[in-house]
Amino acid sequence: MKVLMINTFNYMRGGAERCFLELINLLEENGHEVIKFCMHHEKNEPSPYEEHFLSHIDFPTEMKNGGLGGKVRVFERVLYSREAKQKIETLIQETKPDIAHLHGIAHEISPSILPAIKKYNIPIIQTLHDYKLICPNTNFVSNNKVCEQCKGHRYFNVVKNRCKRGSLPASLLSGVELYFHKMTQIYERHVDTFISPSEFLKHKVESFGIQNQIVNIPNFINIEGFTPCFEPDDYFVFFGRLVSTKGIQTLLEAMRQVKKSKLLVAGSGELEEPLKQYCQEHQITNVEFLGYLNTDKIIPLLQKARFVMMPSEWYENYSMAVLESFACGTPVLGAKMGGIPEQVIEGQTGLLFESGNADEMATKINYMLDHPQEAIQMSKNARKFVEQNNDPASHYEQTISLYHQLVDPIRM
């Protein structure tokens, strides 16, 4: 089968790109031909189709330094990109794909490609990696807090609250974008099926009025590169961006009540210096900041950790960080937020606490430290969880079954 795989970026930029690139590898390993459509970027992986890629655009730079022309270019690219429409049509005419599988297309590519794909009677699937269909700010976060004020198509709230980077122009554009999408019903009329990695995201999208078919297919992970230890050293880990929505501030507040072991913080971000200062002011001596670490250094860290902290204060979808931890045989202490409870099963693969509750978080941390044998059993359970629920073979079978469900009726 020929699969047209679409995502803005063609390099390992984040969780969505990882899912995009690893699914491509999985399909190619099973004999399918994959045709990429992305945006040009200096970090992109090589591709035989890159001559068809969209021109690169950097929105913050264009909005700030591009003058009126830059703002016009951004508005056109976000709302309806004529370049994207023309280039996707040329690529389709040359390659004749059987199905199109979309990932992240908002903003840089835009949904202008959807009617262009449908023009050739090609079924369209889109994997949802965030909440862009229903939230102008993509993540249900406004001013560092979870927000659902835009429910019922009340997208003017993104402008009122300046949700997008605190910027009035960026927030205005995001609001106009969703009003335009809803007015044209461009996703609803053209996407045959959405894939949601978590049940939480599926139910949230449905509750906001999306009536297209939504299928739950969890993310997968290749566990061969992860060797569990089950004999941890005396530390536990937080890894990720140091921003407020990740709950790192609440975690450090909880550490004031944790006197055993050590927390290793792997990551960088806008809060790095304030967090270090907080530890100094409150004499928290059992926290060590490691800065940004690449995957090669993160994995050994996880393998020897007692557990991993996932104190998120936003609606996580289906966390690859949790899957990596489980693959290493490391349980997770996570917030009861978003899709995390679908992965962290209380008392089995880790423990849960109320998001933003430092006292309950500290209690769960201390419990894990005081019950090492239970923690080791959770480690073994965590590894079994990914083996049973997130293996590549199962993900492939579910995905290819969905492909055939849409393609076969057209071929008949």
Image (spheres, grey):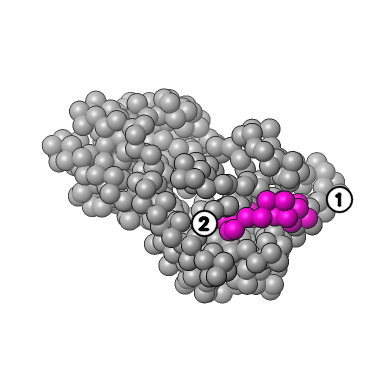
Residues drawn in magenta: 86-107
Q: At 33% across and 56% down in the image, what residue appears?
A: 342
- How many badges with numbers are in the image? 2
**Relative horizontal placement of residue 269, taking residue 321 as reference (left or right):** right
The label nearer to you, 2 versus 1, is 2
Q: On the picture, is 340 further left or further right than 366? A: right
Left or right: residue 23 versus residue 343 is: right
Residue 209 in picture, x, y percent from top left: 52, 74
Looking at the picture, tell me which residue is in the foreground, 83 or 235: 83
Q: Is residue 106 magenta?
A: yes
Circle 1 SS class:
helix
Q: Position of residue 78 (x, y in %)?
A: 72, 56
In this rendered view, identify the residue nearer to me: 120 or 68.
120
Residue to which mark 1 is pinned: 68
Depth check: 3 or 109 in front?
A: 3
Q: Is residue 75 above or below residue 323?
A: below
Q: Quadrant of residue 261?
A: top left
Compared with 119, 372 (above or below) is: above
Q: Position of residue 155 (x, y in %)?
A: 63, 67
- The residue at the point 73 percent across, 55 percent down is 93
Name the residue type under label 1.
Leu
Residue 168: give its label. none
Residue type, mark 2 in image: Thr
- Tag 2 secondary structure: strand
Q: Residue furthest front?
A: 412
- Residue drawn where x is 43% and y is 60% of the image: 401
The residue singled out by tag 2 in the image is 127
| Residue at 57% across, 69% down | 410
Occupied quadrant, residue 182: bottom right
Q: Label 2 vs label 1: CA separation?
A: 34 Å
Is residue 337 a member of the stretch shown in magenta? no
Residue situated in front as seen by the camera: 92 or 356: 92
